[in-house]
Amino acid sequence: QVQLVESGGGLVQAGGSLRLSCAASGRTFSNYVMAWFRQAPGKEREFVAALTRSGLTTSCADSVKGRFTISRDNAKNTVYLQMNSLKPEDTFVYYCAATSPRVGLPVAPDDYAYWGQGTQVTVSS
């Protein structure tokens, strides 16, 4: 089991920045592929970004490419999502997720076994 706890969400004006953190406990953090997803009320959860166990390979959704960066610090058991140039359409609950390693970086929520409780990000215009 891996327990995930997100933090860093909040209210920010359009054009601003936030950094989300996800602290992991339980099993060895560096064994897991990590990802961020986001979800609006009544909508499906959508992929934001993911990275490999080493953090050397990343993938992100086209909608956030060039603005969001995923990274991890295996010594601190933490994965981050740096969000710059935020837009009102980035308003979602953001979730951290973990899964065992596999070929490629999965983008479907069903591919991830462990989830945090989510943190709200609201971008005002």
Image: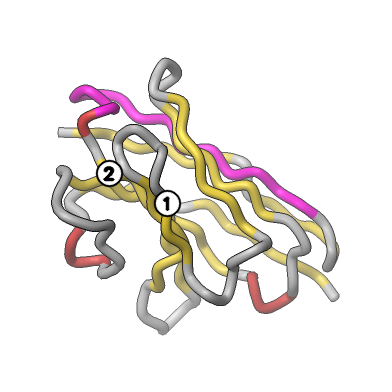
Q: Is residue 117 visible?
A: no
Which residue matches tag 1? Answer: 58
Query: What is the chief secondary structure element of the magenta stretch?
Result: strand
Quadrant of residue 12 in the image? bottom right
Q: Is residue 21 left or right of residue 104?
A: right
Quadrant of residue 23 in the image? top left
Q: Secondary structure at mark 1?
A: strand
Q: Residue at x 42, y 59 (%)?
A: 59
Extent of the magenta region: 17-30
Which quadrant would the C terminus be assigned to in this image?
Answer: bottom right
Label 1: how many Cα within 10 Å (few below 14, some 14–19, many 20+): some
Q: What is the distance, in whole Å, between disc 1 and disc 2 at their CAs? A: 10 Å
The amino acid marked with disc number 2 is Val
Confirm whether the magenta stretch covers residue 42. no
Q: Are marks 1 and 2 in contact (CB under 8 Å)?
A: no
Q: Total number of numbered labels?
A: 2
Which quadrant would the N terminus be assigned to in this image?
Answer: top left
Quadrant of residue 121 in the image? bottom right
The amino acid marked with disc number 1 is Thr
Q: Secondary structure at mark 2?
A: strand
Q: Residue at x 47, y 78 (%)?
A: 41
Q: Nearer the viewer, residue 106 or 97?
A: 106
Numbered tag placed on residue 33 in the rendering: 2
**How far across and how far down the image is residue 60, in percent?**
47, 63
**How far across and how far down the image is residue 26, in percent?**
22, 24
Labels 1 and 2: the sequence-earlier one: 2
Confirm whether the magenta stretch covers residue 26. yes
Q: Residue at x 56, y 68 (%)?
A: 92
Q: How was the colour assigned to the protein in this rendering?
A: secondary structure
Q: Residue at x 32, y 43 (%)?
A: 52
**How far across and how far down the image is residue 112, in percent?**
21, 56
The correct choice, above or below, for 101 with respect to 110 in the image is: above
